[in-house]
Image: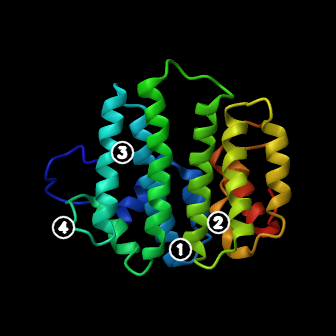
Amino acid sequence: MSDTANPAKLASSEELDARLKRTDENRWLATRYAPAAGRELLVAIYLFYQELQRALSAKEAMLGKIRIQWWRETLEQVGGKGALRRHDLAEELARVTKDRSDLIAPMNDLVDRYDDIVDDHLHASGHKPESDHEARHLAAEASLARLAGLALDAGATREHLDALSRCGEAYLAMVTELSDASAKWNVARGAVRKLPAQLWPAIAHLAAAVSEKPATPTPLRNRWRILCTMITHRL
């Protein structure tokens, strides 16, 4: 959803790339290991994900619903239904998915996951860890990881996409310290052992975000952990 009506100048692809680097450097670093087309897709997808995340922090849940609906309608336009709104990320999504119409459905799935979360904010009182609401958050992260995998390989197998989904869930479980987080992480690590090399940029950022031996995160440490993950194909 645009926060500026009719902006005089839309951000370029390079400026959007810099935006991701500034706001989520770990994911940005991981995208550097993808081929050019896949890198552009991942950058646009992760910025789209940030837009949906913003819906969860709206002052009122209904404002979050409006943002979600705005992006749902924009995705229809990205897919060719109607004139595209003047918005830098909308135009970038349309550009990078021009030959990847197969990504529109999984992007809509991500929107649906966030819509479910915001519905909980509308109709439920408070955030209850380890509840159905928590499961919907995990499902959103799983959907994002699956989408990232498809962006890198349109022919990715269901087994490999399921492994990516497990990583998305396990990541969120670890950072939110759910009681079964370690078990989820161990299952996810095992599931990706046979993941093909082209899919690793979709999850390499997790090496910097999750660690069984926590250490003070630094840019150098994060770069090193992501590099090691891309070399060894191990989380």
- Determine the secondary structure under disc 1: helix
Are there few (<14), some (14-19), or many (20+) residues within 10 Å of tag 1?
A: many
Which residue in the structure is indicated by mark 4?
83
Q: Position of residue 91 (x, y in %)?
A: 29, 66
Please tell me the numbered disc located at residue 38: 1
Determine the residue positioned at 73% across, 44% down. 210
- Determine the secondary structure under disc 2: helix
Which residue in the structure is indicated by mark 2?
201
Give the Cα separation between the discs numbered 4 and 3: 19 Å
At label 1, the amino acid type is: Gly
Q: Quadrant of residue 85?
A: bottom left
Give the mark nearer the N terminus: 2 vs 3. 3
**Which residue is outermost to the top?**
125
Q: Tell me whether circle 4 and circle 1 mark residues in contact (CB < 8 Å).
A: no
Give the Cα separation between the discs numbered 4 and 2: 33 Å
Determine the residue positioned at 52% across, 49% down. 24
Q: Nearer the viewer, mark 2 or mark 3?
A: 3
Q: Tell me whether circle 4 and circle 2 mark residues in contact (CB < 8 Å).
A: no
Q: Tell me whether circle 1 and circle 2 mark residues in contact (CB < 8 Å).
A: yes
Give the Cα separation between the discs numbered 2 and 3: 27 Å
Are there few (<14), some (14-19), or many (20+) residues within 10 Å of tag 4?
A: few
Which residue in the structure is indicated by mark 3?
68
At label 4, the amino acid type is: Ala
Quadrant position of the C terminus in the picture: bottom right
